[in-house]
């Protein structure tokens, strides 16, 4: 595949990606265990927007639930894929994604603890899981960065990855321990840890949108610095990049996005690992195009994965994390097989 020579994300690129995203979003709203007719959907949408009485009440209810879930899937997929692309560029490691630091596992630990022990936030209904997940995500980041700085004052990527992997194993053991003592809640917690957007609400959409708007903007504006990182940290310093500041900024933005996504949808794997690779195959390694394309491709991928999760077995729903892991694993093997064959031909 011949890579484009353009270095920026143009208006034409944005239009094409937006149309593809809207098509995927429309399919997810129309299709399901009970498919909706286009005319019925239009009538229900009109009644929802005007505040009138829907012609078929249950159609409006189904449509509302699907819109909430689909929007959450799109925003979660966009966030996870953008985080993966940023982490791969920052750490110069193709196997990196938003969970490499262990922040995702830390957020999962917080959310599982909140569900198992009934942690709540006074005056804010249903916020206990989200606030606890975000607090654990930040705590995990501070702990990992503190240990990395104590062991290596240069903040080398190898130290950060190593400590992140060790912390992930430690946090995973704690998650299993908490689940073991969760009593009657063990079934719902176990299902949540496999990833699920079944209970998504408009408040979740709003929270995801705000997190992506703030942290996503930070990551997108880091594209020039991430391009400099591709040549090594020393070269990045020589061209005027403040390496430590960029690392901290990207890591904090990724941690916030991961914490929010995990608190709402559970553990959804492979999105941040696979989709940046596919985006890189389409538009090349320049982060000024790679990051926005990763954002759109992640949103489309998770929309389609969620559609499969809720339609493959009829009325019975699969955890979305199972679908993304299966699809992601197969896709990753194909990518590495093609990459290996291309490398052998060049040799």
Image: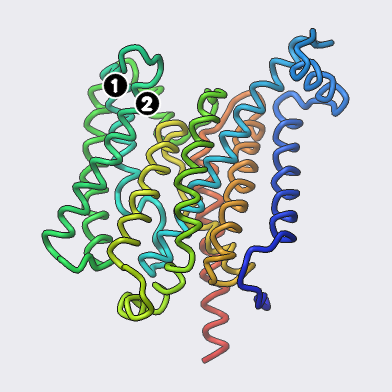
Residue extending farthest to the front is: 240
* Left or right for 287, reference 192: right
Secondary structure found at label 2: helix
- Residue at left 43%, top 36%? 194
- Residue at left 81%, top 20%? 46
For label 2, the crowd category at 10 Å Cα-Cα, with few meaning under 14, some 14 to 19 and many 20 or more, is some
Residue located beneath label 1 in the image: 116
Q: Quadrant of residue 346?
A: bottom right
Identify whether 54 is placed above or below 232: above
Residue extending farthest to the left is: 150
Pointer 2 with pointer 1, Cβ within 8 A: yes
Q: Where does the image place residue 8, in percent across and percent down from the top left?
A: 62, 68
Residue located beneath label 2 in the image: 189
Secondary structure found at label 1: helix
Q: How far apart are marks 2 and 1 (CA)?
A: 8 Å
Circle on res. 154: none
Residue nearest the observer in this picture, 279 or 344:
279
Residue nearest the observer in this picture, 72 or 235:
235
Residue nearest the observer in this picture, 326 or 116:
116
- Residue at left 61%, top 53%? 297
């Amino acid at each position: 595949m011949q890579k484009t020579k353009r270095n920026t994300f143009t208006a034409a690129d944005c239009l094409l990606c937006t149309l593809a995203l809207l098509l995927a979003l429309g399919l997810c709203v129309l299709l399901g265990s009970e498919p909706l007719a286009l005319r019925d959907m239009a009538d229900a949408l009109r009644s929802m927007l005007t505040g009138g009485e829907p012609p078929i009440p249950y159609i409006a209810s189904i449509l509302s639930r699907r819109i909430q879930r689909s929007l959450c899937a799109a925003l979660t997929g966009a966030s996870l894929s953008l985080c993966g692309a940023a982490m791969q560029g920052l750490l110069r490691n193709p196997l990196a994604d938003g969970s490499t630091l262990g922040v995702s596992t830390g957020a999962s630990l917080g959310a599982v603890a909140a569900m198992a022990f009934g942690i709540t936030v006074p005056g804010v209904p249903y916020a206990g899981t989200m606030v606890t997940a975000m607090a654990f995500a930040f705590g995990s980041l501070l702990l990992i960065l503190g240990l990395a700085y104590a062991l290596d004052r240069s903040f080398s990527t190898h130290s950060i990855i190593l400590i992140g992997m060790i912390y992930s194993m430690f946090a995973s053991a704690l998650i299993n321990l908490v689940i073991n003592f969760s009593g009657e809640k063990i079934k719902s917690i176990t299902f949540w840890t496999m990833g699920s957007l079944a209970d998504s609400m408009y408040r979740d959409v709003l929270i995801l949108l705000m997190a992506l708007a703030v942290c996503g903007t930070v990551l997108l504006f880091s594209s020039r610095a991430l391009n400099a990182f591709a040549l090594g940290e020393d070269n990045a310093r020589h061209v005027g990049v403040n390496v430590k500041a960029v690392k901290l900024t990207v890591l904090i933005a990724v941690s916030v996005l991961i914490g929010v996504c995990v608190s709402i949808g559970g553990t959804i794997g492979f999105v941040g690992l696979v989709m940046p690779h596919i985006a890189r195959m389409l538009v090349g390694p320049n982060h000024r195009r790679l990051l926005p394309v990763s954002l759109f491709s992640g949103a489309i991928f998770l929309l389609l994965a969620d559609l499969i999760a809720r339609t493959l077995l009829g009325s019975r729903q699969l955890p979305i994390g199972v679908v993304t892991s299966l699809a992601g694993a197969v896709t990753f093997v194909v990518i590495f097989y093609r990459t290996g064959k291309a490398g052998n031909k060049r040799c």
